[in-house]
Amino acid sequence: MTQRKIIHIDMDAFFASVEQRDFPELRGKPIAVGGEHRGVVAAASYEARKFGVRSAMPSKMAKEKCPQLIFVLPRFARYKEVSRQIHEIFHQYTDHVEPLSLDEAYLDVTQNKKNIASANQIAKEIRQKIFETTGLTASAGISINKFLAKVASDINKPNGQKTIHPDKMLAFLEKLPIEKFYGIGKVTANKMHGMHIFNGADLKEKSLDYLQYHFGKSGLYYYHVVRGVHNGEVKANRLQKSVAVEHTFWDDLVDDDEIQNQLIKLSEELENRLLKKEIKGKTLTLKIKYKDFTQYTRSKTLNHYFETQHDFLEIAQQLWQLRPFNKAVRLLGLSISNLNIHEKKQISVQLQFPFEVGFVED
Ligand code: DCP
Ligand code: CA
Ligand code: CA
């Protein structure tokens, strides 16, 4: 197997930077995105970090550390928009993009659409394009696997990038403090400190048995990553292409009233499915399977999104008029495609803590 080229991209002080971009009066100031009176800090601007304000810190404590801290409520729709923009840029280079959250992703650029050999160069271009398109800065890590790329993107943050070359990788890992290992949280790091494991070199001295005994399944992961072994693939999100509902009938339908009833039911079900998934689409397809098992589809695309079951029904009835035969019907289905989802929609926002009440996502 040829050595892979993996890039990890992560936006700098993401929510806070978007707010500072959109509201120039916030630039250069210590700001926290989150609720002021209850809740926690989601993101802190770099100015706020100088005072020790951090993500996930209770707002009260943040205010104590930095009395002039300005609180701003989050605007997720805005962050998602930026997320979409950066993903569009990623996809100019490769479709092997694995999002980790709204503001970060792994890219496998071993093969890339522009045939650029240097992953370093690609990371530079992507960061430049992100800045031109969004006015925001990103940092990047470049290496031979996801683990190393992820760790690397933190090193020259903000607005920087770092390559960990294969020949430097082992030395780098030996020196790396254990709490900087991706996948080792605070609790595990403390436990390791108690075992005199402070950096990669200490970790490497422990046997696989020892690590598995103390850390279970993760032991194997630690054993591998400290040796530069991490074979996890960049898993591209597969996009949902359509949403469908269908009914197969016990008794084949011949009567037009029954057909109409079924179209009403299917329209209603389709609407419910789409509401639940918070998806909309522009193309409706009617599927007809006849008693003899021959199957046909008829589609119509609108220049706007279907909104309600009435829209579905109206078009479904038109499509039914286009049916090829008047034969007994065994199955009817409706599906919607040309959806308004981008893969970002499938990434949940990284929100582990509640904000103030009275604020709604989107
Ligand atoms: N986030 C959140 N709650 C957390 C951590 C993060 O809501 N506990 C949100 C706000 C962040 C965004 O996710 O802006 C991205 O998280 P990061 O951990 O990447 O942190 P930042 O982008 O804010 O800063 P950095 O420059 O260190 O990446
Ligand atoms: Ca970030
Ligand atoms: Ca992030």
Image (tube, helix red, strand yellow):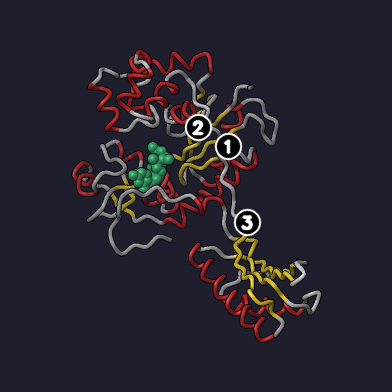
**Callout 1: SS:** helix
Query: Residue 78: x and y, percent?
Result: 46, 55
- Foreground tag (3 vs 2): 3
Asked whether residue 331 is in view, the answer is yes
What whole-number distance in Å separates the C-alpha atoms at marks 3 and 2? 31 Å
Give the residue type that dot 3 points to. Lys
Query: Label 3: few (<14), some or many (≥20) within 10 Å?
Result: few
Question: Mark 1 sits on what residue?
Answer: 126
On screen, residue 284 versus residue 174, left or right, reads right
**Callout 2: SS:** strand
Query: Label 2: few (<14), some or many (≥20) within 10 Å?
Result: many
Q: Which residue appears farthest toward the left when viewing the image?
A: 64
Q: Is residue 246 above or below residue 228?
A: below
Quarter of the image with the C terminus is: bottom left
**Callout 3: SS:** loop
Q: Is residue 125 above or below residue 177?
A: below
